[in-house]
Amino acid sequence: MVENHKDRIIDEIIKVCEKVRTPAEMIERLQVAKKENQFSKAVEGIKDAIPESLLIDGHNPLTLLYAALSKGVHAKTDEQCLDLARDIRLVLAELSERLVLALKDEDELKTAVSRLLKS
């Protein structure tokens, strides 16, 4: 699922980068990663190109997800697979919340500034 939505996730990360005025070099790396067909290469290319506001406990969430998903699950017990699925779900949910919050905060701030300038 994460690999299938890679482009969409990276698009949202790029939006946050543009909002927080991330250096153009980082945004370019994200755009290159989006075009990459291999998920592992995409993640490797952007391991340090994520805005700080999206890091989870100081870690790139895509790197965390890739590490969890790249390990073979066939050798794991059902209980271990369920634990892994829960962890992946939590990291995805947290990333989603951070993306929404980062974009929302900036929009709200722009609206507030605009209203103050008009008054």
Image (cartoon, rainbow, N blue to C red):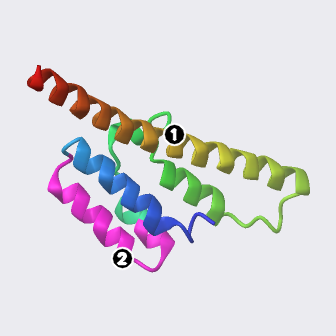
Q: Is residue 46 left or right of residue 5?
A: left
Marking on residue 30: none
The disc label shown at residue 35, or none: 2
Q: Is residue 37 magenta?
A: yes
- Single out the residue that lies furthest toward the right: 78
Q: Is residue 24 left or right of residue 27?
A: left
Instruction: Say if residue 55 shows up in the picture.
Output: no
Q: Position of residue 84 (x, y in %)?
A: 74, 51
* SS assignment at label 2: helix
- Residue 86 percent across, percent down from the top left: 74, 46
Question: On the rendered structure, is 56 left or right of 73?
Answer: left
Q: Amino acid at mark 1?
A: Glu
Q: Quadrant of the N terminus?
A: bottom right
Kind of residue sitting beneath label 2: Lys
Residue 90 position by quadrant: top right
Left or right: 5 with respect to 102?
right
The percent position of residue 70, horizontal first and vertical second, equals 63, 65
Q: CA distance from mark 1 to mark 2?
A: 25 Å
Query: At 9% across and 25% down in the image, what residue appears?
Result: 117
Majority SS type along the magenta span: helix
The answer to whether marks 1 and 2 mark residues whose Cβ atoms lie closer than 8 Å is no
- Start and end of the magenta stretch? 22-42
Can you identify the residue that label 1 sits on? 97
Label 1 element class: helix
Q: Residues within 10 Å of mark 2 (few under 14, many from 20)?
A: few
Please identify the residue farthest to the front as the structure is shown.
119
Choose mark 1 or mark 2, whichever is in front. Answer: 1
Q: Is residue 52 magenta?
A: no
Q: 49 or 31, which lies in front? A: 31
